Amino acid sequence: MQVVKKILGALFIFMVAVIVWMPRTELYFKLEHILSQKGVYLNEKSISDGLVSLEIQESQVYFEGISLATIQQSQLITLLLWNRLEIDGVVVDDGFSDRLPKEVKHISLVYSLLAPQKIAIEAVGTFGRLEGSILLDERKIYLELVEVAEIKKIKPYLKKGKKGWYYETSF
């Protein structure tokens, strides 16, 4: 029994060490590099690496050189088995505000190894509140408006279902 306790203790210490010393900043810069190959560029004011999190302040999002949106704050929490990305204060630039919601107050993306093929999404903005998921194995995105507010701008992209408005696409 002592051997099992020692093995489990060593495994726990190893997992904690991996979480604490994970190169989150380098992973963020790798993500920036991958996005730049698709024409999406991020320009942030500051990045701070915490014990289990990475915080990014005042990011500007560009698509093919055109300013798309400003993100007030982002926080990535990494715990190996469970990861969460919180994005606050997304404001779409005026050039795209006729096709996209002007403001998204909060976006939450959660990934868990218990459901490795799914990323859960929740968001609150001028459109109301939505919940949905990204199905990685099926390469689909499904978003359902739970509370509807101002959807005039995004209504052409939405479909009407039994429960209400939803958006579905493949990638």
Image: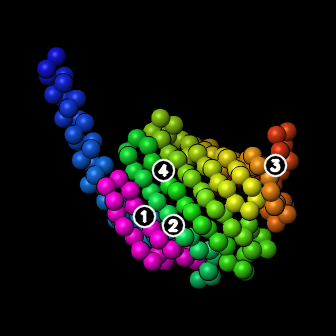
Residue at image x 86%, y 47%? 160
**In the rendered picture of this protein, how many numbered marks are placed on residues?**
4
Q: Are marks 2 and 1 in contact (CB under 8 Å)?
A: yes
Span highlighted in magenta in the image:
36-62
Q: Earlier in the sequence, mark 3 or mark 2?
A: 2
Of 89 and 2, the residue lying toward us: 89
Residue type at tag 4:
Arg
Residue 171 at x, y percent in the picture: 64, 55
Q: Which residue is mark 3?
A: 165
Local packing at callout 4 (Cα closer than 10 Å; few below 14, some 14-19, many 20+) is some
Residue at image x 61%, y 58%? 106
Q: Nearer the viewer, mark 3 or mark 1?
A: 1
Local packing at callout 3 (Cα closer than 10 Å; few below 14, some 14-19, many 20+) is some
Q: Are marks 3 and 2 in contact (CB under 8 Å)?
A: no
Q: Name the image quarter holding residue 161.
A: top right
What is the C-alpha distance between the residues marked 2 and 1? 7 Å
Q: Which residue is mark 4?
A: 84
Q: Which residue is mark 1?
A: 55
What is the C-alpha distance between the residues marked 4 and 3? 26 Å
Q: Are marks 2 and 4 in contact (CB under 8 Å)?
A: no
Q: Earlier in the sequence, mark 2 or mark 1?
A: 1
